[in-house]
């Protein structure tokens, strides 16, 4: 189920959000360059994912289960794992000697009303090729639930779900430490894109996902109401 409001589009599952992001890029993306090769880039998007489940039908059917442990390790281990150029685990738990997850937990325990539980994953002046795609996380308690926002400067829509799943684990960890249930996860992506080399795979997934009303839009229009000539 999909709803739309002032905060952006709200998707019921991780899989639905993943499909929508790929459709958005295919419907409105325009050609651009990238260090790894040509891409299609689309307009920024803001959305929420209401629920995550181990038996997510879309992720189970179309996702790459073999890559999930690799991406999970990227978020949990503090060493850089090839082929990645940085570790989210290190930036979240040992950035310049600070465990930022522990820091936000302490902050919200003492100030549950706070909007300051924001952590940055970037380091000023770092190598150009090591700037992380995930640039920040924000945590806040509202209506007795822990909400989390993930901000991406850029995101490969084809593999987006591989980041959302471990991010939900982090949200759940902080919520449990505070003795709270978790709420939805909000995601902002400034430059959603797909590599041209992956377009055939993306198109095959979107063609196979024939659930009626999945994106609530016309065939030539993306799930966020944007249209483009590319693709």
Image (cartoon, helix red, strand yellow):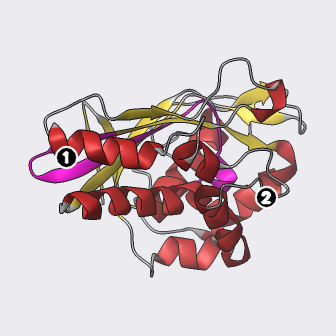
Q: Nearer the viewer, residue 187 or 19?
A: 187
Could you tell me which residue is drawn at 65 percent across and 37 percent down? Answer: 133
Residue 13 sits in quarter: bottom left
Marks 2 and 1: CB-CB under 8 Å? Answer: no
Q: Secondary structure at mark 2?
A: loop
Q: Report the quarter where the C terminus lies.
A: top right
- Work out whether 189 lies above or below 172: above
- Work out whether 56 lies above or below 14: below
Could you tell me which residue is drawn at 72 percent across and 27 percent down? Answer: 30
Coordinates of residue 215 in the picture (x, y in percent): 44, 52
Q: Residue at the bottom extreme?
A: 55
**In this figure, which residue is indicated by the disc labeled 1?**
109
Residue 100 sits in quarter: top left
Coordinates of residue 201 in the picture (x, y in percent): 77, 61
Q: Nearer the viewer, residue 127 or 26?
A: 127
Coordinates of residue 115 in the picture (x, y in percent): 24, 29
Which of the two discs, 2 and 1, labels the residue nearer the N terminus?
A: 2
Could you tell me which residue is drawn at 38 percent across and 67 percent down? Answer: 52
Q: Is residue 154 something that shows in the picture?
A: yes
Tell me the magenta residue range.
139-160
Q: Residue at the top extreme?
A: 125
- Work out whether 204 lies above or below 65: above
**In this figure, which residue is indicated by the disc labeled 2?**
81
Coordinates of residue 170 in the picture (x, y in percent): 43, 58
Could you tell me which residue is drawn at 51 percent across and 56 percent down? Answer: 164
What main secondary structure does the magenta stretch of the protein show?
strand
Q: Secondary structure at mark 1?
A: helix
**Residue 143 included in the magenta stretch of the image:** yes
């Amino acid at each position: 189920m999909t709803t739309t409001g002032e905060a952006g589009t709200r998707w019921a599952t991780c899989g639905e959000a993943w499909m929508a992001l790929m459709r958005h890029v295919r419907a409105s993306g325009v050609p651009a360059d990238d260090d790894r090769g040509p891409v299609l880039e689309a307009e920024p998007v803001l959305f929420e994912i209401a629920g995550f489940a181990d038996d997510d039908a879309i992720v189970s059917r179309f996702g790459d289960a073999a890559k999930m442990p690799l991406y999970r390790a990227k978020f949990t281990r503090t060493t850089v794992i090839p082929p990645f150029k940085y570790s989210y685990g290190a930036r979240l738990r040992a950035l310049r000697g600070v465990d930022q997850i522990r820091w936000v937990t302490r902050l919200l325990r003492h100030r549950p009303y706070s909007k300051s539980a924001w952590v940055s994953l970037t380091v000023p002046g770092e190598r150009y090729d090591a700037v992380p795609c995930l640039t920040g996380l924000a945590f806040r308690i509202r209506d007795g639930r822990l909400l989390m926002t993930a901000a991406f400067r850029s995101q490969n829509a084809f593999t987006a779900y591989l980041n959302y799943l471990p991010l939900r684990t982090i949200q759940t960890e902080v919520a449990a430490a505070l003795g709270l249930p978790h709420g939805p996860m909000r995601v902002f992506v400034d430059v959603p894109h797909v590599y041209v080399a992956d377009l055939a795979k993306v198109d095959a997934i979107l063609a196979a996902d024939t659930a009626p009303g999945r994106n609530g839009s016309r065939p030539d229009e993306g799930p966020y109401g944007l249209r483009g000539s590319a693709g």
